[in-house]
Image: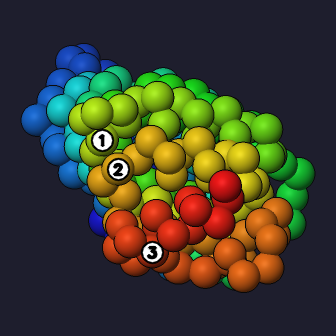
Amino acid sequence: MLNVIPMPKMARSGSGSTSGFPLLEELCMATTAVSFMTDQDLTKILYNSPKLRVLDLRGCSRITAAGLSALPCEELECLYWGLYFSSNVTVSLSKKGLHLLAQKWSSTLKELDLANQLFCEEDMEISMGHLAQGTGADSTLCSLNLSGTKVTTPALRLIIGQSTALNYLNLSSCRYLPRGLKKLYRGQQEIHQLLEKFE
């Protein structure tokens, strides 16, 4: 449903409630334009979708971490929530609540895209800690896009040290990192070399 603007329908009187999408595993609501999708809209679509594994909300700037954490899916594997277009990337106060998502899906996430999401440094560090704890020996996180975020060196050290399956790490345009580290890392060898620079 790329670039689709959802329009809620008025329920007909006498009609029973719908069962939603109980078997839905993937949903793409990404947009390349202005997004009108809100937490309430997303909840109306996914209120009965416990099997959801892939959620693509790129460009959906009105969706919040609290709204996402309230979704019924407990085993989300891929969350694409980056903001890539100038109409979606706004200069605003730091967002909060990322740790709610990291805590909820720390043991199931394989791919996480947070490009240009402006969560505060403390929230980023707590979130990376949750993701690091969730990976452990059964490390599943293999792709992490943090470009344009406020991620810090201590937060990165937490996640890189524990995520043995990580083979894609995007740190381009991360203002809180030292020069020379703000780039795209592909493959476990490059990521391991980055970890060595922190020590």
Image coordinates of residue 8 in percent, x first then y, are 42, 45
Q: Where is mark 1, residue-wise?
A: 139
Report helix, strand or loop for mark 2: loop
Tell me the quarter of the image containing the C terminus.
bottom right
- Identity, as a three-letter code, of the amino acid under mark 2: Thr
Tell which circle, 2 or 1, labels the residue nearer the N-terminal end: 1
- The image's mark for residue 164 is 2
**Distance of label 1 from label 3 (alpha carbons):** 18 Å
Q: Earlier in the sequence, mark 2 or mark 3?
A: 2
Residue type beneath disc 1:
Ser
Q: Nearer the viewer, residue 154 or 121?
A: 154
The amino acid pointed to by label 3 is Glu
Q: Residue at x 40, y 47 (%)?
A: 163
User: Is 174 placed above or below 65 here?
Assistant: below
- Is 150 drawn above or below residue 21 in the view shown? below
**Quarter in which the N terminus is drawn:** bottom left
Image coordinates for residue 22, horizontal then vertical, percent: 15, 30
Residue at image location 61% in from the left, 71% down from the top = 171
Give the percent coordinates (x, y) of residue 124.
69, 44
Determine whether the residue tagged by mark 1 lies in a helix, strand or loop.
loop
Residue at figure coordinates x 36%, y 32% from the top left: 136
Q: Is residue 114 left or right of residue 126?
A: left
Q: Mark 2 and 1 residues: CB-CB less than 8 Å, in contact?
A: yes
Instruction: Name the secondary structure under disc 3.
Output: helix
Crowd class of label 2 (few under 14; some 14 to 19; many from 20; radius 10 Å):
many
How many numbered marks does the figure carry? Answer: 3
Q: Is residue 25 visible?
A: yes
* Residue 114 image-quadrant placement: bottom right
Q: In the image, which disc is placed on residue 190?
A: 3
Q: Is residue 55 left or right of residue 129?
A: left
